[in-house]
Amino acid sequence: MIKKLLYLGVICLGVAMAVPTTRARLLETAAPVTDSFRSRITVRRVSAMADQLTARVNRGEGLPGNFEGWLRREFTGTPEDAWGNPYYLQARRDGFVVGSTGPDGVHGTDDDIREQRRLR
């Protein structure tokens, strides 16, 4: 009985996703959950990028001139965050900032995910 109800629920969800207006409502309802999940993934990825860039600089290689190319070749294979926005790298005199513009895709807003590193 439970399996049948579960199957029925999956079928209903599939049908609802096929209707554009219903799909939009379902995705809007799920946005807080998916944004939270995407944020956690992006925080981890930005931190891993910062670690790898720090190691690269400490080896004397410097920051990559083509950040997107570096991401594709040496980091993850994708230069976009979980929302499809490009990651960014800002070189500074005493270090660098690597980050994501977050869900709104606008640089410099409260939802940005970024990590600043100071170098020796």
Image (cartoon, rainbow, N blue to C red):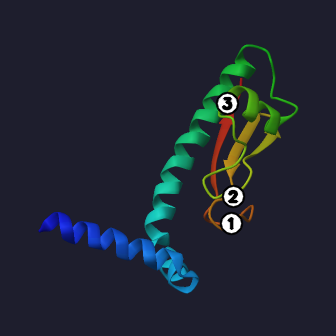
Circle 3 packing at 10 Å, graded few (<14), some (14-19), many (20+), is some
Q: Are marks 1 and 2 in contact (CB under 8 Å)?
A: yes
Amino acid residing under circle 3: Phe
Residue 32 seen in this snapshot: yes
Residue 53 seen in this snapshot: no
Circle 2 packing at 10 Å, graded few (<14), some (14-19), many (20+), is many
At mark 1, the secondary structure is: loop
**Label annotation for residue 75:** 3
Query: Does 110 appear above or below 93?
Result: below
At mark 2, the secondary structure is: loop
Residue nearest the observer in this picture, 19 or 41: 19
Return the disc, 1 or 2, that comes first in the chain's sequence.
2
Amino acid residing under circle 2: Thr
The total of numbered circles placed on residues is 3
Circle 1 is placed at which residue position? Answer: 109
Query: Does 41 appear above or below 61?
Result: below
In terms of image quadrants, where is residue 4? bottom left
At mark 3, the secondary structure is: helix
Question: What residue is drawn where x is 24% and y is 67%?
Answer: 6
Query: Does 10 appear above or below 25?
Result: above
Q: Nearer the viewer, mark 2 or mark 3?
A: 3
Circle 2 is placed at which residue position? Answer: 101
The N terminus, quarter of image? bottom left
Judged left or right of residue 15, residue 70 is right
Return the disc, 2 or 3, that comes first in the chain's sequence.
3
